Amino acid sequence: MSNFKNLVSALEQLVDPCTGLALAPPRAGWEVQGDLRACRVELVAGYPLAADAVSGLRHEVAARVEAAGGGFAAFEVRPRIAAHAVQPGLSPAPRVRNVIAVGSGKGGVGKSTTAVNLACPAAAGRQVGVLDADVYGPSVPAMLGLSGRPESPDNKSIEPMRAFGVEAMSIGLLVDADMPMIWRGPMATSALTQLFTDTRWGDLDYLVVDLPPGTGDIQLTLTQKIPVAGAVIVTTPQEIATLDARKALKMFEKVNVPVLGIVENMAVHVCSNCGHAEHLFGQGGGQAMATQYGVPLLGSLPLDLRIREQGDAGTPVVAAAPDSAAAQAYMAAAQAMAAHLAARPRASMPIASTPF
Ligand SMILES: Nc1ncnc2c1ncn2[C@@H]1O[C@H](COP(=O)(O)OP(=O)(O)O)[C@@H](O)[C@H]1O
Ligand SMILES: [Mg+2]
């Protein structure tokens, strides 16, 4: 037994490949079973790790077991996604463990595209939803290829619709596509809170909220009324876009919503004929902003014809072409986002009572 104790302390020194933080309580826990000659090691992680992260860890775990004088039989990772702390005065909504807001300063930088591609990667043990908070210009239904009306069996609440294993709700599913949303601020904001509270979400680990551009009424409502565990900022590398993205970042900081990271979009265009790489919107803007504010750069997406085409076709690139470089970049960003959230404090404060 005491050997296992030493082994567990050795395992707790391994670091999370996404965050560089130790895989130790309260973020993660280790369980060792069997006997030292043939032990089964299980990592209980706060988010689902991608296959390459697991195989990297498997080598390190084997080395630690060997160093402890043991024999290695098996290694498994089990995700256990907790609800994380939200703004002071609010608590997480029932059935939605973590709301993650995707925001930007400017429109047209690829926020909705990023939101659906962060939500869609199929990963075992991860239930995700998308809430389209752009009530004036909803684009989530088209990007997920959704049509028809959601059902409302009790005439009070609405069932989310499903696409690519993801639950989705949008005002665009409730009104005709060509109907303009001629709403005053209070109507638009109450539409957002109703979409959030009146949707019968399943048991979601993450609800990705696609915000309209800017820092107006909708964003204010979101940060005051809806419990948000973290935010992701989308920007292009251009100076003018990062200037606006900084405002969005500051808004989240002001209301105590942690910024989990930045996604730089349209960073580079690779010519499909000659392979020449061009930085159409400048270079390094996302990284510079991340460094300045001490937040991670979750990913840098190329300007890629397929991202646009798949978006228009209603099949996000992560679902349509999961092996493409663009899809891989989104998947890595989704994993990094989940990893940085998992490193945040839990919603239920007493750390001592956490399951690890
Ligand atoms: N990385 C990308 N490469 C190519 N086209 C993109 C990329 N990101 C977004 N787009 C396209 O740019 C347009 C605007 O993106 P969208 O996600 O709607 O922006 P926002 O929600 O910020 O207004 C869409 O037509 C989308 O398909
Ligand atoms: Mg949008």
Image (tube, rainbow, N blue to C red):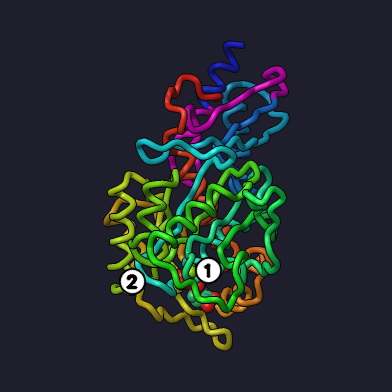
What residue lies at 63% left-to-right and 47% top-to-bottom?
A: 200
Up-down relation of residue 324 to residue 87 (above or below): below
Q: Which residues are magenta?
A: 11-39
Q: Residue furthest top?
A: 2
Task: Check residue 194 in the rendering and tell me which mark sits there, or answer none.
Answer: none
Q: Looking at the picture, which amino acid does disc 2 mark? A: Ala
Q: Is residue 302 visible?
A: no
Up-down relation of residue 1 to residue 132 (above or below): above
Q: Please indicate whether residue 105 sits to the left or right of residue 155 in the image.
A: left
What residue lies at 53% left-to-right and 31% top-to-bottom?
A: 28
321 in the magenta segment? no
Which secondary structure lies at badge 2?
helix
What residue lies at 43% left-to-right and 55% top-to-bottom?
A: 232
Q: Please indicate whether residue 151 sits to the left or right of residue 176 in the image.
A: right
Q: Circle 1: is it few (<14), some (14-19), or many (20+) Cα within 10 Å?
A: many
Task: Check residue 138 in the rendering and tell me which mark sits there, or answer none.
Answer: 1
Nearest the eye: 30 or 156:
156
Up-down relation of residue 97 to residue 265 (above or below): above
The number of callouts visible is 2
**Image position, residue 134 (x, y; %):** 48, 65
Magenta part mainly helix, strand or loop?
A: loop
**Image position, residue 33 (x, y; %):** 69, 21
Q: Please indicate whether residue 73 sits to the left or right of residue 211 in the image.
A: right
**Image position, residue 186 (x, y; %):** 39, 59
Which secondary structure lies at badge 1?
loop
Which residue corresponds to mark 2?
241
Up-down relation of residue 193 to residue 173 (above or below): above
Mark 2 to mark 1 CA distance (whole Å): 21 Å
Label 2 CB, ligand 1: below 8 Å? Answer: no
30 in the magenta segment? yes
